[in-house]
Image (tube, rainbow, N blue to C red):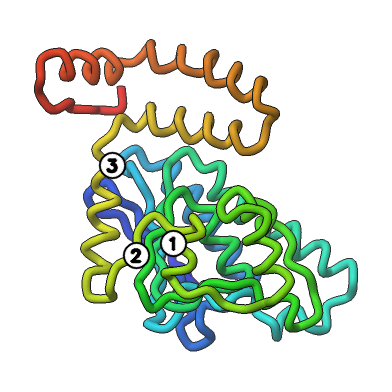
């Protein structure tokens, strides 16, 4: 039975799970309910064997997400802010460490916690009218939580610039600085996101899962430990039919048919 959600929509079609942020009236401002529902949807797509890849997009024509719901956090007690930070981290981490690749599809504003949500995904596709930033500093607070992975996306200089100035980057600058995988005009957006989803979905599901785990190690562990982890982990893939099929297909010069076995 499908869960009913109030702040997101969730659908699965042709191996692609789509989580759609659905508070367009507040530019998908992130509140507790949305955080809980994103985690629930990520749990659902992990359990669903039919899902090969996920897309995280938005029902708003103006924003992916403009960030945290300021009305919710403005009068929080100081310790409440720590609890909220941990809640955000739990949700962004659920995506970052999900078994399946997640593609962020961004059309419009992608700010603060919204940017942290996007950069927790595996790939970022955006329209040329999108804008990116960490306006936290403008309301008197620093950027925290998954902003910590921005230096790996845009370098320490880019991360400092975003954090200190609170100014927005257009899509061209975001792409130039290494934040985005593709930038397209709005009219080509859906088609582009679908094409990326299909490219990823065509791969061996277990190889993708292993690859994502290895990449997370590259991001979080010291270099030699991460390499050692990857060397040990590849053994899992040698136990699969997909590995024999992939290499067999290569040698026979035919397309591989991956089944996830």
Question: Secondary structure under badge 1?
Answer: helix
Disc 3 and disc 2: Cα gap in Å?
20 Å
Q: Residue at x 73, y 66 (%)?
A: 143
How many labels, in total?
3
Q: Position of residue 187 (x, y in %)?
A: 22, 75
Whether residue 158 sits left or right of residue 86 in the image: it is left
Local packing at callout 3 (Cα closer than 10 Å; few below 14, some 14-19, many 20+) is many
Residue at 56% over, 61% down: 117
- Earlier-in-chain disc, 3 versus 2: 2
Residue 243 locus on image (x, y percent): 30, 17
Please say if 217 is above or below 73.
above
First in sequence: mark 1 vs mark 3: 1
The residue that disc 1 covers is 175
The quadrant where residue 160 appears: bottom right
Side of 26 where 16 appears, left or right: left
- Against 35, residue 59 (above or below) is below
Q: Which tag is nearer the camera, tag 3 or tag 2?
A: 2
Of the image marks 1 and 2, the number of the one nearer the N terminus: 1
Residue position marked by numbered label 2 in the rendering: 183
The span from disc 1 to disc 3 (Cα, nearest Å) is 24 Å
Density class for disc 1 (Cα within 10 Å; few <14, some 14-19, many ≥20) is some
């Amino acid at each position: 039975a499908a869960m009913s959600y109030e702040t997101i929509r969730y659908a699965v079609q042709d191996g692609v799970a789509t989580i759609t942020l659905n508070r367009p009236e507040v530019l998908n401002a992130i509140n507790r309910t949305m955080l809980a529902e994103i985690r629930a949807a990520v749990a659902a797509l992990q359990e669903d064997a039919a899902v090969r890849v996920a897309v995280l997009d938005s029902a708003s024509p103006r924003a992916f997400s403009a960030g945290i719901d300021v009305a919710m956090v403005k009068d929080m007690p100081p310790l409440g802010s720590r609890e909220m930070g941990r809640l955000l981290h739990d949700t962004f981490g659920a995506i970052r460490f999900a078994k399946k690749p997640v593609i962020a599809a961004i059309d419009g504003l992608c700010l603060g916690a919204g940017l942290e949500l996007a950069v927790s995904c595996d790939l970022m596709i955006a329209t040329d009218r999108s804008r990116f930033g960490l306006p936290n500093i403008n309301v008197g607070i620093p950027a925290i939580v998954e902003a910590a992975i921005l230096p790996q996306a845009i370098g320490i200089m880019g991360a400092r610039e975003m954090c200190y100035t609170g100014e927005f980057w257009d899509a061209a600058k975001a792409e130039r600085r290494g934040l985005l995988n593709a930038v397209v005009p709005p009219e080509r957006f859906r088609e582009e996101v679908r094409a990326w989803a299909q490219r990823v979905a065509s791969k061996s599901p277990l190889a993708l899962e292993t690859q994502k785990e290895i990449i997370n190690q590259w991001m979080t562990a010291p270099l030699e430990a991460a390499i050692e982890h990857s060397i040990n982990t590849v053994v899992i893939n040698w136990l699969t039919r997909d590995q024999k099929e992939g290499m067999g297909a290569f040698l026979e010069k035919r397309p591989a048919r991956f089944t996830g076995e």
